[in-house]
Image (cartoon, rainbow, N blue to C red):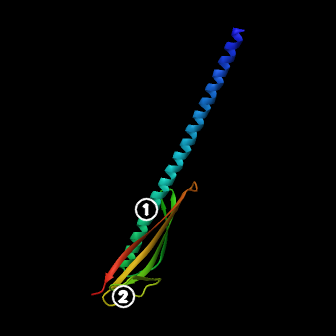
Amino acid sequence: MKKGIALLVALGTMILILIIGGLAIYLVTRALNVTAGQKRYQTAFEACEGGLELGVLNAHNGFEAHTIGEATLLKNISNYRVHIYVRPLFATTEAGAVIKFARGYFGAGQGLAGGGASYYYKIVAASCGLAGDSVTTETEIKRVIGID
């Protein structure tokens, strides 16, 4: 009788150890999947930031060349395909007044007397990886021409 109880206790202990070991393996595997997803997201975000920097450079070069216009760029950054959209916005500031927005470009210095012209660019970058992970970020930059 004592041998039978010892066998049952040994089998019960072994089953308990197997359940705990299986649970530990499951939790470690799950944590590795979460960590891999976080790493892919961080890499996609960094590629998106690179796309924003390229968009800012494109807007700056367009402003310096006096060609303010829309641009759509497609770049491969690391293993990510990054779509970059540069869209100019136009705003005039009047002395002591609010900013008035209108889509379009009317020429440098077209603000009212005592004001100036502020040029805003909206830059959107969207990155997409091979595993389907994607990130979209956007920013706005401003350039000002004062009227003397």
Amino acid type, callout 2: Gly
Residue at (71%, 12%) from the top-left corner? Answer: 4
Give the labeled residue for mark 1. Answer: 50
Residue 90 image offset from top left, x and y in percent: 42, 81
| Residue 115 placement, left or right of 140 | left
Task: Depth check: give the residue in front, 129 or 13.
Answer: 13
Q: Residue 16, relative to residue 77: is it above or below? A: above
In the picture, residue 107 is in which quadrant? bottom left
Tell me the quarter of the image containing the C terminus.
bottom left
Residue 53 image offset from top left, x and y in percent: 41, 65
Disc 2 element: loop
Residue at (63%, 27%) from the top-left corner? Answer: 18
Pointers 1 and 2 in contact (C-beta within 8 Å): no
Residue 114 image offset from top left, x and y in percent: 30, 88
Q: How dense is the environment of label 2, judged by Cα within 10 Å: few (below 14), some, or many (20 and up)?
A: many
Residue at (45%, 64%) from the top-left corner? Answer: 51
Give the labeled residue for mark 2. Answer: 111
| Residue 52 placement, left or right of 17 | left
Extreme residue toward the left, this view: 148
Mark 1 or mark 2, which has the lower sequence index? 1
Task: Depth check: give the residue in front, 35 or 19.
Answer: 19
Q: Residue 95, relative to residue 73: is it above or below? A: below
Residue 77 image offset from top left, x and y in percent: 47, 60
In the picture, residue 94 is in which quadrant? bottom left
In the picture, residue 52 is in which quadrant? bottom left
Q: Residue 24, relative to residue 126: is it above or below? A: above
